[in-house]
Amino acid sequence: MPGPLQSVERAAAVLRVLGGAGRPLELAEIAAVLDLPKTTAFGLVRTLRDVGFVDQPPPGSAYTLGSGLTDLDRLGLDPHDLRSHATNWADALAAHVRLEVLVSMPQDDGVRVVHHVFRPDDTAQVLRVGESLPLHATATGKVVLATTASRGARPSVLERFTTRTVRTRAELEGELQKVRRQGWASALGEHQPGVGSVAVALRGLGGLAVGAVAVVGPVDKVFGPGGEARADVVREVRSTGRSISRALVAPW
Amino acid sequence: MVSRPLIAAIDQGTTSTRCMLFDRQGQTVSLAQREHRQEFPRPGWVQHDADEIWRNVQRVVPAALAQAGAAPTDVVALGIANQRETTVVWDPRTGRSLAPAITWQDTRSDEIVETLVADGHETLVREVTGLRPTTYFAGPRLRWLLDHVRGLREKADAGELLFGTIDSWLTWNLTGGPDGGIHVTDVTNASRTMLMDLDTLQWDDRLLAAMDLPRAVLPEIRPSAEVYGTCASLLPGVPLAAALGDQQAALFGQTCFTAGEAKCTYGTGAFLLVNAGTKRPPSTPSLLTTVGYVLGDDAPVYAVEGSIAMAGSLVQWFRDSLGMIPTAPQIETLARSVDDNGGCYIVPAFSGLYAPRWKQDARGVIVGLTSYVGRGHLARAVLEATGWQTYEVVEAIRAEAGIELAALRVDGGMTSNHLLMQFVSDVLDVGVDRPLVSETVCLGAAYAAGLTVGYWSDLAALQRNWHRAASWQPSMDPALRRREAARWDRAVEHALGWAGHEDE
């Protein structure tokens, strides 16, 4: 176990000084307060400026805390931001595959629907937003399990919904390895008989998995006669997942 | 592979110009967009550069084609939707605009409108045009230009000046400009000039005389869906087959083809239009009667309209000026952190109230503040303000136009706010439906153009393309609705007359 890193401690001290000053500080003032050589202080301030934690409004002027710091706690994805970014792409997906579309985010110990586009056939349907999906029996849930490292997200009980629901942890682990390998998940009648789904992960900043987009529909519309997910459906879902992920990384 | 042929639509809006291509299912094939400059030379003045707008059209159309890998020959018709009431004057020999395009938000014509009313013409305006005399409409702006821009009156008298709304400007340019451009306007745009007779669908000489405007500079009024001419450039040989004001285009894109069907577009403001059938609806005290669309030689379809000044812009204010939320969608997160408005109401009369109250001297208020009220309650009150303003418009439509809504079709950015959509459904006590294609303005222009050239066979074919992407059903207890409506009404009373008192 290595000891505390001096440069990180010093960077934190620079931020504290800037935060406590109540006015912009010149480089010389920062160096004097922390009793550091000016070159060392300059290196610290410059690096913090490059990552957005320090601002220097006109170049060459005094330094202040950066907007990147205040944004830190806002980087966590909000379900309503996700819905707003996903809407146009989810609409297009539903139009192309003629099936309903779900966009979901992990929440507490499960995964919850944050956006739902009806199957475009004008039959009576009810918004499923807020519904919790079983992790081990839906394509969305498997994507979340496969892309989330947290052990806490593992279902404690594998509830059996149909005869096709996975029964053992080994079976589930095999499924998740397949999902990681191929980059998408499917579920064939594992939650409700006759209902199939295909899902891919949505990735935010740094490639972190933040949720999933899925199409859900009658098994014969999602799977081919041999029980394999239809290639055109998989292609559309993957392409939608990439588009939404792009919108999440560079939203404005 | 994209199925050919395609329909093209241009949506020339307040902030940007976009071109979209659609296939036979009404699905988006490509979209290109470009923003233009907003000029605010004085308080209350908002203008655009019409030449810049035309240059942007010349960029977005090829960009949309390139995106789809399509050639002009793949396009069978072009339709236009445009920001309404914005006024352009240009020189037909040079093809250049002669003054800035004065937009619909601009209030510089207020003295002209006041004089018109003082001269006793208000009844004439209401009876002939179905509109209330306000600075919102194009005719008084033309008068302002002729009065205030040096040399324009002389040019107009010498036949060296043409006037039009944005649809006219684009149509003239697309069909050849100085080299044979057609000077026409679509009837829905003409109905927003305050110069058109809503019965005959022609310019009214009494109003032209009252505003001292020369008839020779006005475009010819044509149906919304008809081949005006063929494009000389950009899409050479392609018939220009439709034009509609943007809100009428959204009504058409939402396929509200039957009397009583209504749509509301929730953007910066909110615009609710209801199809009023083929008989001109009687003028109402608090709503606008206007043309919904005219298809070729068919009878005109009228619409009743209620406009709400602030909807999404109140959320932006909550985000930018108050810093309550980091992003607009997160207002829903904040609003859901509490169960109700905590007794707090916000009336967003930042620059007065539009339909149905039309009170220019109202100003915004927040009422019902107690120590109990927190940020979450304020967020609720922001969203509920849009719901209640929609409710007031729908109540006026019921009481004054005798039209009972069976459902409301919605579009625009705020439809991704489910809390708001449920609240709208709750207070209106009708179902609210969001369609699968959210770009209803462009889609409406494309539909009208495609119908003209036979790409789609009839209105029923368009209706089959409309699909519900989401719907919200009312679930509010009627007693609660009555109580909350009464409280909102009392909140509005506190907003009325505020600006007037300040001036005393």
Image (spheres, helix red, strand yellow):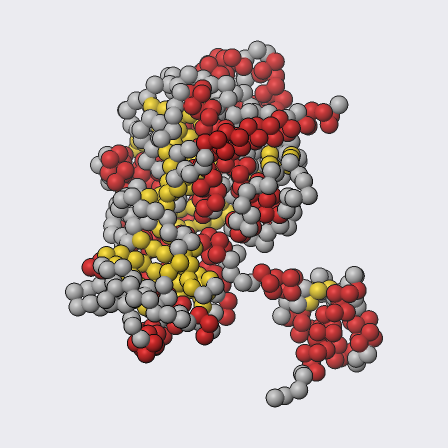
Picture coordinates of residue B454, whole percent (x, y): 23, 37
Relative to the observer, which residue lies in front, B279 or A77? A77
Q: Residue farthest to the bottom?
A: A1
Relative to the observer, which residue lies in front, A80 or B78? A80
> In this view of the protein, can residue B208 be seen by the observer?
no
Relative to the observer, which residue lies in front, B192 or B36? B192
Picture coordinates of residue B421, whole percent (x, y): 45, 42
* Residue at screen point 45% across, 54% down: A83
Direction from residue A48 to residue A177 in the image, left or right: left
Relative to the observer, which residue lies in front, B173 or A3? A3
Is the residue B65 above or below the residue A150 in the image?
A: above
Picture coordinates of residue B477, whole percent (x, y): 45, 35
Quadrant where the N terminus of chain A sits is bottom right
Direction from residue B391 to residue B201 in the image, left or right: left
Q: Residue farthest to the top?
A: B120
* Residue at screen point 25% across, 52% down: B3
Quarter of image, res A134: bottom left
Is the residue B337 above or below the residue B476 in the image?
A: below
* Residue at screen point 42% across, 59% down: A112
* Residue at screen point 61% across, 30% down: B491
> In this view of the protein, can residue B395 be seen by the observer?
yes
Picture coordinates of residue B139, whole percent (x, y): 51, 24
Is the residue B352 above or below the residue B14 in the image?
A: above
Report the label total: 0
